[in-house]
Amino acid sequence: MNDKDLMLSKKIQDYYEKQYDTYQASVILHNERTFLERLRIGETLESLIPNGSKILDIASGSCQWIEFISSKIDNYIAFDSNKSLLDHAMAKWPEKVTPMHGNIFERTSDPSIYRNVDILLLSFFLSHFSDETIRELFLNIVPLKKTIIIIDSFQHIGNLKFNGLELVKRKNSNHEIVEIPKRYFLEEELIGLAGEFNLSMDLKFKGMFWFLCVFNVGH
Ligand SMILES: C[S@@+](CC[C@H](N)C(=O)[O-])C[C@H]1O[C@@H](n2cnc3c(N)ncnc32)[C@H](O)[C@@H]1O
């Protein structure tokens, strides 16, 4: 990771350190449109996950997607740098969640975190990073030949935002205004990423705000 991204990644970790409450409770559930979109993503995810799946949720936060897939998963490894969000997930899903606390960028090339996992889930994480950092992460995870599911912020003709990574203002749980890097993915960017790594890309859900896509090897 380059120096600029390293500095920005600390900002991101700091911001989420101060999110004591669950991310989705404060941001998503209070808006009817995002509430419904989240439901659609949850249903799409549920339809995609085979019974008995073992999932590694990279930057899991409080594991917001388990409620949709709990009956289908054997093991759900939740990796996050924020211990209080992991504790929240453990309190809610003690039998399903195996927590792993740490900085993912220090562990991406560590094979032990991927052991016994068949699906890698990245939800609302990649949109905090530059193309370069996303590619570095993909260089480590694509050779594992797992299914990669990405849920994140979407940009399309009906919802135009800025292109690429920018600093945006957010309020943390202490009501302080902080700046964190954020981007809104274009469909072309997802297609480009898949092409670079020789992956298939299936955009399974395209919403007003968010998308769910599946990257697979060998097509
Ligand atoms: C927008 S939240 C998404 C949480 C969850 N995936 C979801 O969809 O609700 C981003 C998460 O990334 C975590 N995070 C940020 N930087 C991280 C890092 N370097 N390593 C591991 N987790 C990180 C934060 O603690 C936070 O839980």
Image (spheres, rainbow, N blue to C red):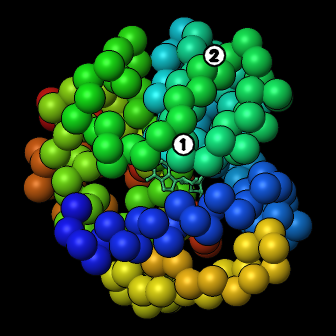
What's the mark number on residue 80?
1
Q: Which of marks 1 and 2 is nearer the N terminus?
A: 2
Q: Is residue 186 visible?
A: no
Few, some or many residues within 10 Å of mark 2 (<14, 14–19, 20+): some
Measured Cα–Cα span from mark 1 to mark 2: 22 Å
Label 1 CB-ligand 1 distance < 8 A: yes
Measured from the top left, where is residue 84 in percent x and y?
72, 44
Select label 1 or label 2 by which is in front.
1
Nearer to the camera, 159 or 13: 13
Please identify the quadrant where the C terminus is shown.
top left
Nearer to the camera, 124 or 197: 124
Measured from the top left, where is residue 182 in percent x and y?
47, 76
Callout 2, which amino acid?
Lys
Please determine whether, in this image, residue 114 is positioned above or below residue 23: above
Q: Which residue is drawn at 58% across and 65% down?
A: 14
Q: Can residue 6 be seen in this view?
A: yes
Q: Which residue is drawn at 54% across and 35% down?
A: 101
